Amino acid sequence: MIDPLLLLIQVAILVLMILPGFLLKKMGLMPGEAGKVISNIVLYAAQVALIIAGFCTVNFSTQVLLRMLAVFLLAVVTHLLFYFVGRLIYRKAPDEKRRVLVFSTVFTNAGYMGIPLLVALFATEHPEVAIYGSVYVAAFNVFLWSLGAFLYTEDKSYISVKKMFINPATIATFIGLAIFLLSAIPAVRTYFIDPVIRNEKGVIFPLMNNLKGLVAPLSMFVIGLRLTAIKVRDVIRDKYLYLNLALSLILLPVLIFGILKLLSVTGIYHDPLTASVLMISASAPAATATSMFAEKFDGDSPYAGLTVSVTSILCVVTMPLVCALTLLY
């Protein structure tokens, strides 16, 4: 189960990482393109290392594999549910805002914030927990590069198998999954995985560890950069933003808990760790991809940045409160 106080501390630490980016931008020490450059570092290097490293921590076991499958299926349900609810709730919003609002509702910061939080909370007792976070992110990316791109462009060509599975995070998941499955073969584990991939005195393991450590601080740093463009009056006057905050940070995560609880009491599926992974991932703030994709596809990037920044700040309060529901699981 999730310790709400420990989660509060860990979320607060992550959110405080926003400050350096905010202050440096305000002081004029960061160029205009810094956000895009740093985002690419996180997307194509740090997150890839984070995902692969998660799969390398433990040897193959049927229990872990089954839990991975459960997390993936529940993550797919979560994203589809968030999409249909978002489309329904924001159908009357102005077109440019609607795209941002639906996108930010569907896609949470499950990778950049969710996985570091899961590791901080559960790695001691469950060293494989990063795998489950990575599996949730795999489902995230299946939808991100297809449905996510479609939300901004309304171009149906993005709804394709190629775009669903050929992207950095999904490829990293396939690599990590291959390592995890191969660890079931004693000879491969003894002569390749342990001495080459897991060797702390080698090259691959230290490289991945150093790169994955960049995910949380750099992603928060980028949010800090974008926070400088926010005007308080834009937050106060936007009724749709209030709706987005209530829906994304509170109501939908509570709905996910309701589904998990229903599966538990009916005897269909009960697993506290899976429930914790889903709750942390679903209750995370809007994904930084909300603004990255808005920039990429000529969406309303200022509004996207506003949504990401405000949800990232308020999640310090909402995530511990919502995730405290796992004590009732």
Image (spheres, grey):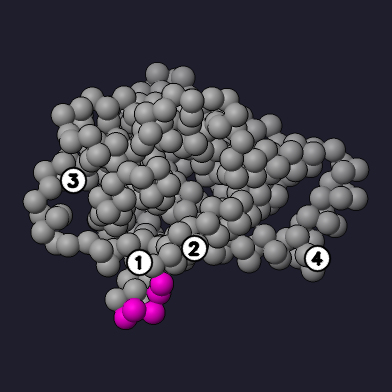
**Mark 2 nearby-residue class (10 Å; few <14, some 14–19, many ≥20):** some
Q: Is residue 126 visible?
A: no
Mark positioned earlier in the residue sequence (4 or 3): 4
Q: Quadrant of the N terminus?
A: top left
When the figure is inspected, residue 272 is found, relative to residue 4, above or below; the finding is above
Task: Return the residue nearer the eye: 195 or 153.
Answer: 153
- The residue pinned by badge 4 equals 202
What is the spatial separation of the Cα atoms under label 1 and label 2, in whole angstroms?
Answer: 11 Å
Check disc 2 and report the residue beneath it.
Answer: 38
For the residues labelled 4 and 3, the Cα–Cα distance comes to 48 Å
The residue under label 3 is: 241
Q: Quadrant of the C terminus?
A: top left
Viewer-side label of 3, 2: 2
Residue 260 location in percent, x, y? 39, 29
Q: Position of residue 288 (x, y in %)?
A: 40, 51
Give the residues drawn in magenta, as a range: 27-31
Give the residue displayed 58% in from the left and 44% down from the top: 169
List x then y, in percent, for residue 307: 27, 50
Q: Circle 1 sits on which residue?
A: 225
- Considering only order in the chain, which callout, 3 or 1, is on the residue closer to the N terminus? 1
Q: Residue at x 85, y 38 (%)?
A: 185
* Helix, strand or loop status at disc 1: helix
Label 3 crowding class (10 Å Cα cut-off): few <14, some 14-19, many 20+?
A: many
User: Cα distance, mark 3 to mark 2?
Assistant: 26 Å
For marks 1 and 4 on the same chain, the one whose residue lies earlier in the sequence: 4
Q: Is residue 64 left or right of residue 286?
A: right
Amino acid type assigned to the residue bearing label 4 in the image: Gly
Q: Amino acid at mark 1?
A: Leu
